[in-house]
Amino acid sequence: MRPMSFYRSKLEAIFLLAILFGLSAPAEVPAKKWNAQWQPVKLVNGSPVLFRVTAPLQFTELKGSFLGQEFSFRSSKACHCWYGFAGVSLTTKPGTYTLQVEGKDAGGKEAAMSYLVRVSAAHYPTSTIKVAPAFVEPPKELDPVIAAADAAKKQAFAATDPSPLWSGAFERPTDTETSGVFGSARVYNGKKKSQHLGLDFRASPGTPVHATNAGTVILARPLYFEGNCVMLDHGQGLLTVYMHLSEFKVKEGDRVAAGQLIALSGGTGRSTGPHLHFALRWRGEYLDPRTLLDLHPPGR
Ligand SMILES: [Zn+2]
């Protein structure tokens, strides 16, 4: 090697070294290999999943299939990767499952890859809850009220945008502490057993509740068990639900931005006291909202 002083500048030297070591010029995209990663790293039943894939071709579209659900990936310049949202239902048994990805480039050239993904068993706790008896065994005369609520929910669950409406990280709906975790087995008044399908936040009545991400308001009305309830559609079967509210700040059909005020918290419906119940629903399954808040999708 000639001494550094031989080169007119350090930059020139670095450039020459780059050529010697076979690096491509910065403007060119280096040839990539297939690679897949997921968050959380350890998957359990009840967990949402964020898959990140890098592919060897300049794909124009990338599709995935995992646990019987098909989903599409979005490309991100921030990570030079593709990312897609999927989930592991609560009823999924521990085991190894296949993630399949399939891409297509502008010329119609296709390529596919598969990965083995391990799913472990979650350990969800048990808790005992006391609520008004009418919320454990509702009286017969309330049948029409409950049926109407069920119909409204069914209609809301069926409405999802074919495109993703969310982007970036999912934010906490309130700034307060959590008080009840997802997946805990619940014994209501020593009788009825169910599983807690959301994340509870401590919230004195009137606490502002914010949209966790951008979406459309698909439901904003009182329901029997949920109380005043807001459901947001984030597209492609990804919904978030906010329950026991005291006041609505949005109406059905509204488009909301991430972090937008959507309601004030309360203690309406089947509630042990004022708090916010926050739920994540994906393709008809409730998944752990705690994990959703911990995901790191590429930036907005
Ligand atoms: Zn709850």
Image: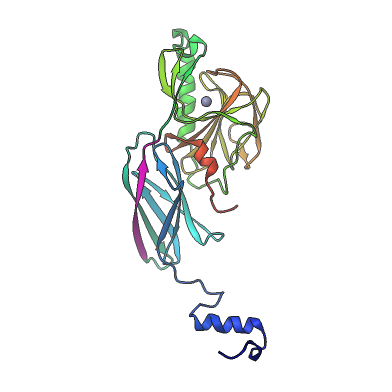
46 and 123: which one is in front? 123
226 and 216: which one is in front? 226
110 left or right of 295 in image: left
Which quarter of the figure has residue 242?
top right
245 left or right of 193 in image: right
Image location of residue 114, percent across then percent down: 33, 56
In magenta segment, residue 177: no
Q: Is residue 8 above or below residue 129?
A: below
Identify which residue is drawn at 51% across, 19% down: 225
274 and 282: which one is in front? 274
Image location of residue 101, percent across then percent down: 37, 55
Which quarter of the figure has residue 95?
top left
230 left or right of 73 in image: right
Specify the segment rendered in magenta: 110-122
Image location of residue 86, percent across then percent down: 43, 45
| Secondary structure mostly taken by the magenta-highlighted segment of the chain | strand
Image location of residue 115, percent across then percent down: 35, 54
Q: Tell me the colour scheme of the image.
A: rainbow
Identify which residue is drawn at 43% across, 30% down: 124
Q: Is residue 96 above or below residue 18?
A: above
In which quadrant of the rendered image does the N terminus lie? bottom right
